[in-house]
Amino acid sequence: MEITTHNHEGRQELQLQGRLDANWADRVGQAIEMAIQSGHHQVDLEFTRVDYVSSAGIRVLLKYHKQLKAVRGALRVVRPTAGVLEVLQLSGIAAMLVAKLESNEPEKSSVAPAAPPPNPPRRWEEDGLEFELHTLGPEAELVGHLHGRPEAFAEGNLSASRNHELRCEADWVAVGLGAFGRTADQGKGRYGETLAVAGAAVSMPTDGSSVPDYQVTEGRLIPEMQMLYGLSAQGAFSRLIRFEAGRSPRGVIGLSGLVARVFETLPAPAAAFVIVAETAGLVGGTLLRSPDQSAGQSPLAFPEVRDWMNFTTERANERQVALIVGFAEKSPSPDSLPFLRRIGPGTPAQGHFHAAVFPYRPLPKGRLDLAETVPPLLNTGTAITVLHLLADEREFEGVGETDFMRGACWFSPLRKFGHAPQN
Amino acid sequence: MNTGYSCDVANNFDALPAAMAGLSRWLEEQSVAPAASYLASLALEELVTNCIKYGYDDTAAHVIQIHLQLAGGEMIMTVEDDGHPFNPLEQAEPDTNLPIEERPIGGLGIHMLRKMSDRMEYVRENGKNRVTLHKILNP
């Protein structure tokens, strides 16, 4: 089997030559996967020189047909030979896979075009990075709250008796050190990196388990968190920016660069963010032990910090999907400053971002609904880990900052950033 | 015309490509009509794959015997294995009218063989499964 790749009027065309059998099905699957991972959601398989397809080949065609359909894309088989066409017809998949061509001219996408958005997006290119800005609700904003005292973490004095409850309603976003539960007792010994968005929450427990816990709102059952400290905000997102770095010189966009772009479009001193992105590398740390168990010992002291935190020593989680919730402020107030860190070289603003990491899957293009994007991510793929994103800007040994290939970022101005009343 | 081809395939996936290539070569030399040639390749791949995946509990080496005969304007192909009793004709037909998302994967290979052959037979004899496919060469 030979596979050659062409770009044809916005569609990625893979010319196949040979037999699509059990022996080659995986290789063809990898080629389609690569096209999808490089951002192509319209993929044509040119079949003129394919003389044989078995059920193993059909399985691959079906797998990627489903995957692309889920992101409003399409996989098509173009110009199959008579023998192969018969097999596709017998399998009942010819009608949905085989492109109807007239006089050798590719027909327009077999998928009905999505209804035009109410407000057309603004598109621009900058240093090879492509952006698409959708206005969702021009007046929308979020009201921010600070919970607890992050200083108490460094002092080893974080106590579950002074925790904060958070009901993860659909219009709340939050990051912090938390654990699922209705009472402080339920969180004891399990507090870890946590994020909440769109009625869903993910938390990396520190009780020795290696996979994150997650909950998604089911009817009236809303996830409830106990937080030792953290930031939350309630409201709606005013804008969505889609970003694509595949054709830029570095092929990636950093978290700090993305935050800088957001502040360019948003005349506000502070902002809240939800990012769903294909990762090129995440840099940060994950808490390993529950800080309510620190008994006066500072988790950040050396060398104890090694038992408390797992820092990425090289860029981790390449080519996965990250769900990120975060806050950034240009000039932090004394109240918010302890909660915020430098984000990276691209912006002087400071922030606090947590990322839940999932196995790779492509994201639909264009305008995306947050409430329709987040729950499926949690329900169909087990989260791998939760990280507090931290740039490592040390001059020589630093591993840099979190980078993305492409993705979606919902954001809104953040009004007020005051201490929430304690429970 | 009365000519035949036989080969033994070991029950591991590494043996399949060479067996497929050998069969293809012979089909080409005999100028077998495309539809029959396709069916023969498909039968080898689908039946041997099924047998390797589901036919045996042990880790011992087994041999799956392939035999083809061109006689009386017909291609007759038999695939014989000493795995668990398995009658492909008793497999439920996949519902190819179901929406693609709801369709179970599996059973498709055998469905294709039944549709593409003119007749398909199964016998269990002497502890062996034998599947026979008939295809008229010049319909």
Image: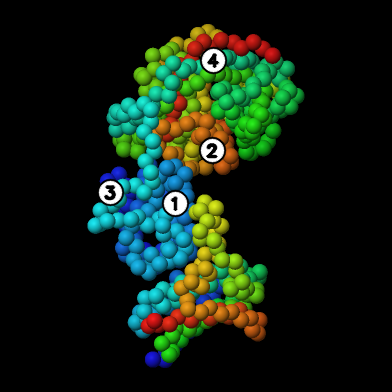
Give the residue at mark 1. A65
Give the residue at mark 3. A8
- Residue type at tag 4: Gly
Nearer the observer: mark 2 or 1; the answer is 1
Identify the chain of the residue marked 4, using the numbered disc in the image. Answer: A
Residue visible at 49% across and 27% down? A274
**Mark 3 closeness class: few <14, some 14–19, many ≥20 residues within 10 Å:** few
Q: Disc 2 vs disc 1: Cβ atoms closer than 8 Å?
A: no
Q: If you read the primary sequence from the N terminus, does the residue marked by circle 2 or circle 3 appear first?
A: 3
Q: How is the image coloured?
A: rainbow
Q: If you read the primary sequence from the N terminus, does the residue marked by circle 3 or circle 1 appear first?
A: 3
Residue B22, quarter of the rendered image:
bottom left
Q: Disc 4 vs disc 1: Cβ atoms closer than 8 Å?
A: no
Gap between marks 2 and 3, in whole Å? 31 Å
Q: Position of residue A255 (x, y in %)?
A: 43, 27
Q: Disc 4 vs disc 2: Cβ atoms closer than 8 Å?
A: no
Q: Disc 3 vs disc 4: Cβ atoms closer than 8 Å?
A: no
**Mark 4 closeness class: few <14, some 14–19, many ≥20 residues within 10 Å:** many
Identify the chain of the residue marked 3, using the numbered disc in the image. Answer: A
Gap between marks 3 and 4, in whole Å? 47 Å
Question: Are both tags, 4 and 2, on one chain?
Answer: yes
Give the residue at mark 2. A377
Say which of A165 and A310 sits in front: A165
Label 4: state its secondary structure: strand
Identify the chain of the residue marked 1, using the numbered disc in the image. Answer: A
- Residue type at tag 2: Leu
Residue visible at 42% across and 54% down? A96
Visible in this render: residue B59? yes
Q: Position of residue B135 (x, y in %)?
A: 45, 80
Nearer the observer: mark 4 or 1; the answer is 1
Tell which residue pokes out farthest to the right in this image: A185
Give the residue at mark 4. A144
